[in-house]
Amino acid sequence: MTSLDVQRDTKPHDRRHPAGTQQQFHAWAAVVRAAVEAMQQLAGESRAKERAVEGLLRSPNPDPTAIGRLILKTKARRLEIERVIGALPGLDAIG
């Protein structure tokens, strides 16, 4: 046991924040970080599709089918982002 371990063991326990709460918070934070990473990736894909639509619209003979497909894929990404946001646990979930 190191002196740091002894210091940890001799600290008074704060009853307002049980030991499990810190672990729950770290687990919650990991879920939130993963959700943020997923949303960033989906947002990047959405931006790429929007740029592709812009490029098609600037072309001399835009393909309406390709534009429609890209718009639908962009909307699907936005819906997926909304799903990720809706699935996020609130802070109240950690007790």
Image (cartoon, rainbow, N blue to C red):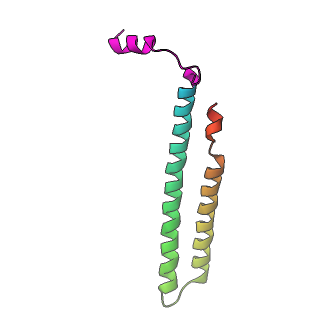
Residue drawn 52% across and 16% down? 13
Q: Which of the two residues, 11 or 63, is positioned nearer the viewer here? A: 11
Residue drawn 58% across and 21% down? 18
Give the x, y percent position of residue 80: 62, 57
Tally of marks: 0
Q: Which of the two residues, 85 or 42, is positioned nearer the viewer here? A: 85
Q: Which of the two residues, 82 or 25, is positioned nearer the viewer here? A: 25
Extreme residue in the bottom direction: 60
Q: Which of the two residues, 81 or 94, is positioned nearer the viewer here? A: 94
Which quadrant would the N terminus be assigned to in this image? top left
Residue drawn 54% across and 43% down? 32
Image height of 16 relative to 25, above or below = above
* Magenta stretch holds residue 15: yes
Residue drawn 52% across and 89% down? 61
Extreme residue in the left direction: 3
Give the x, y percent position of residue 46: 53, 65
First to last magenta residue range: 1-20
Image height of 66 relative to 85, above or below = below
Which quadrant would the C terminus be assigned to in this image? top right
Give the x, y percent position of residue 52: 49, 74
Image height of 71 relative to 80, above or below = below
* Magenta stretch holds residue 40: no
Give the x, y percent position of residue 85: 62, 51
Using the rendered view, name the quadrant where residue 2 is placed.
top left
Residue 56 relative to residue 65: left or right: left
Image height of 57 relative to 8, above or below = below
